[in-house]
Image (cartoon, grey):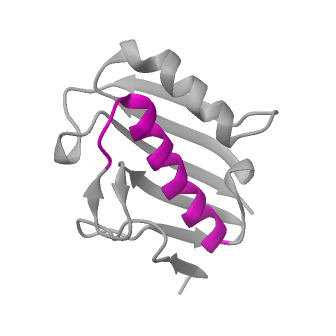
Amino acid sequence: MSNRAIISTPYAPEAIGPYSQAVKVGNTVWISGQIPLVPSDMTLVEGDISAQATQVFKNLAAIAEAAGGDLNSAVKINISVTDMGDFAAVNAVMQEFFEPPYPARACVEVAGLPKGVAIEIEAILAV
């Protein structure tokens, strides 16, 4: 069996499907896509894309901490948005959570996301 460890924290939303918050193998952590759910009551954050992105990055940060790292341990970020017009606002929020040098990143526009949210972000960390 591999040295696979499942990462879970009450400070990020529970999985809403058959997946783990994150999986760690060696010093690599794969964090599942996070949407703007508030962990304490599993409700969606209300507000614009900046409010949604802020909650998503908070969720990612909580999982990164549970895995023994932080968001600056990220080597790759994948962002999905339902409106590429939100790109600049998401960039502004991201800069509040990361320090240079920034991780590699992709950002794509998608037709829809779970629970009708405007953003979902996943991350790969090296811790």
Q: Decide whether residue 48 is among the magenta residues.
A: yes
Q: Residue at x 56, y 40 (%)?
A: 77
Q: Which residue lies furthest to the right in this view?
A: 101
Residue 38 vs 25, above or below: the answer is above
Left or right: residue 57 versus residue 109 is right
Q: Which residue lies furthest to the bottom in this view?
A: 1
Residue 40 lies, in percent from the top left, at 37, 71
Magenta span covers which residues?
Answer: 45-67
Q: Residue furthest top?
A: 85
Residue 94 lies, in percent from the top left, at 60, 34
State the residue in front, 75 or 113: 113
Residue 15 vs 31, above or below: the answer is below
Residue 18 vs 84, above or below: the answer is below
Residue 107 lies, in percent from the top left, at 47, 26
Left or right: residue 22 versus residue 111 is right
Which image quarter is the C terminus in? bottom right
Q: Residue at x 18, y 47 (%)?
A: 115
Q: Decide whether residue 57 is among the magenta residues.
A: yes
The secondary structure making up most of the magenta span is helix
Residue 56 lies, in percent from the top left, at 45, 48
Quarter location, residue 17: bottom left
Quarter location, residue 103: top right
Q: Which residue is drawn at 61% across and 73% down?
A: 66
Q: Residue at x 49, y 21 (%)?
A: 89
